[in-house]
Amino acid sequence: MTFNNNADVGGNTARRGGGRGGLVIGGGLAGLGGLAILLLNLFTGGDVGSLLGGLEAPQPSEGTAIAQCDTGADANANDDCRLAASQLILDGYWEQRVRDYRAPQLIIVDGSQSTSCGTASHATGPFYCPPDETVYIDPTFFAVLRTQFGAQAGPLAQLYVLGHEWGHHIQQITGVMERFANDGTGPTSNGVRTELQADCYAGAWLKDASSVTDPKGVAYLQRPTDAQLRDALNAAASVGDDNIQAQSGAVRPETWTHGSSAQRQRWFTSGYQNGLGACDTFSVSGGEL
């Protein structure tokens, strides 16, 4: 998804946190097994750092502002700026749709960052931490999707990932996470329904994202192209539980925590085509998921 070059994105409050070389993983995270751990814990609001073991957490950092991120042209040229600028669009979208909306913090992780939910890094993938009300994302994660799972992970796919994590913040502040507590794993579990709803929220946001404007009335984003939408759907499929498990061993639906590739694509598409009203994943039967 392309930013308009003259859009003013200088009002973002995203911070860069952590520092290169600050992450130590016992035994390494090499090979397909490690990647399965990485991707199986994507897009979660839980303690991802503790699942990897042997992590030497860095000291908390207040972070620094994202440099050279003032215009849409900057966002088009740089992953860090693209993610930071998208914060403005997400907040502009959700504050019009959620009563008493409060914005989460966005931390662009550089190496690793300590959080209340464990250590954030490219090894744990993007995630939302409810106690911090913060989204943590290391842009080098997109290289993992490209090199290990064949995803293009282009601009719209990156915004899908970020919009998904913002969806978890919406679930947090609207009480969804509290009402539908963890009830185990499986394709119809509350955990999977929570993840699929966040996918749907991301789709609904991206459908209307091009209508959000900067203080001068310039739209931040152009409407997505068909090719960009295919890239986002490809990213959704790449992080389906069945796709990840198929590459690391047998597919075991009873252990799913995020949904299959087909489910993730279907709910993203539902949000994109039909809006937020189509995102109640908790009221549908298992067969409709």
Image: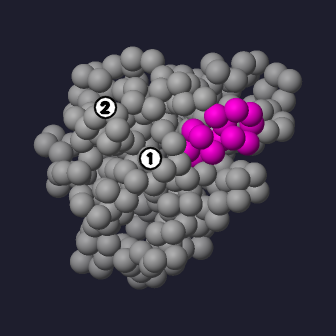
Alpha-carbon distance for marks 1 and 2? 22 Å
* Quarter of the picture holding the C terminus: top left
**Amino acid type at mark 1:** Gln
Q: Is residue 199 left or right of residue 243?
A: left
| Residue 143 position (above or below residue 44) | below
Give the x, y percent position of residue 213: 27, 72
Give the x, y percent position of residue 159: 47, 59
Q: Secondary structure at mark 2?
A: helix
The disc placed on residue 79 is: none
**Amino acid type at mark 2:** Gln
Label 2: how many Cα within 10 Å (few below 14, some 14–19, many 20+): some
Q: Residue at x 76, y 56 (%)?
A: 147
Marks 1 and 2: which is nearer the front? Answer: 1
**Colour treatment of the image:** one colour
Q: Toward the viewer: 13 or 32? A: 32
Q: Is residue 27 visible?
A: yes
Q: Residue at x 72, y 18 (%)?
A: 53
The disc placed on residue 263 is: 1
The disc placed on residue 172 is: 2
Q: Toward the viewer: 144 or 274? A: 274
Say whether disc 1 or disc 2 marks the residue closer to the N-terminus: 2
Q: Secondary structure at mark 1?
A: helix
Q: Is residue 130 left or right of residue 257?
A: left
| Residue 257 position (above or below residue 166) | above
Q: Toward the viewer: 167 or 121? A: 167
Q: Residue at x 42, y 38 (%)?
A: 195
| Residue 234 position (above or below residue 36) | below
Question: Where does the magenta region start and end?
Answer: 239-251
What main secondary structure does the magenta stretch of the protein show? helix
